[in-house]
Amino acid sequence: MASADVTTAVVVDDHPAIVSGLEAWCAAADPPIEVVDSGPTPAVAWTGPGADADVVVFDLQLTEQVPAFTDLRRLVDNGRQVVVYTMREDRDTILTCLDIGVSTFLAKTEGPGHLVGAIHAAGSHLPYTPPLMARAMSTDNRPGRPGLTPREVDVLVNWFACESKDMVARKLGLSVRTVNSYIDRVRIRYANVGRPASTKAALVARAIQDGLVGLDEL
């Protein structure tokens, strides 16, 4: 980060007008967000100042006609905090991005307030759930496993190993409210695939069934 109070971002988007608007919103944010670089391809997130940016703001629809899921997965697998910011609003695309492990999925119709909030949250490794993403999660009725994000799994497994959510929060550098938010997301995901888990014991059972944790880790 540029300083203790400034979140840095790199923007992957091939529409100059969108980039200009985003830069203006970030400059006016409180606390400020510094857009260190932007470009029409994911290369801008891997080279120059973009390589060290706290957050990658990523448009799925670049110069190609198909969503850039491969590039998105590469960024997430490399540990980058990614906010998808796109014109696409269909549920399947949203859920695919969440399964890949993005920090937040945001439609460009959802406005600057949500974008600034999503970037601030991602820069602090915190969840942010805008309306469209919340709606997609709440109607996720796909069969089988719930497709938890890496951060959701991390919080869940640490909760199993700790005596309280307070301990999880201290260990991961999060607030208790944030820990609760992640666990609530997990419960929603399991409920939506027909495998409700309303108690901690039930979540442990689901996690064991899905290979997220072994009995020797509990």
Image (cartoon, rainbow, N blue to C red):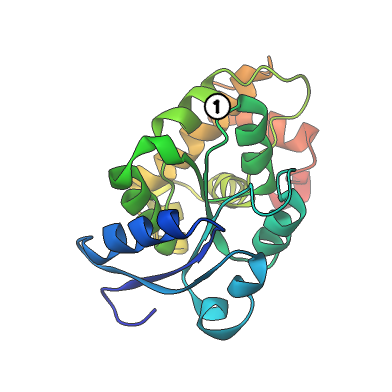
Q: Report the amino acid beneath label 1.
A: Met
Q: In this view, does 149 lie above or below 78?
A: above
Question: Is residue 88 left or right of 68 when viewed as pictured?
Answer: left
Question: Is residue 2 left or right of 28 when viewed as pictured?
Answer: right
Q: Is residue 43 above or below residue 156?
A: below
Q: Residue 29: name its quadrant.
A: bottom left
Q: Which residue is drawn at 64% across and 53% down?
A: 62
- Foreground residue among 159 and 5: 5
Q: Name the residue under label 1.
A: 137
Q: Which residue is drawn at 66% across and 63% down?
A: 75
Q: Residue 71 at x, y = what percent?
A: 72, 59
How many marks are shown on the rendered structure?
1
Q: What element carries label 1?
A: helix
Q: Residue 39 at x, y = what percent?
A: 56, 68
Quadrant of the frame with the N terminus: bottom left
- Foreground residue among 173 and 7: 7
* Residue 123 visible to an observer of this rendering: yes
Q: Which residue is drawn at 73% across and 62% down?
A: 74
- Foreground residue among 95 and 59: 59
Q: Residue 192: name its quadrant.
A: top right
Question: Is residue 104 left or right of 78 when viewed as pictured?
Answer: left
Q: Is residue 127 above or below residue 91?
A: below
Name the outermost residue toward the bottom: 48
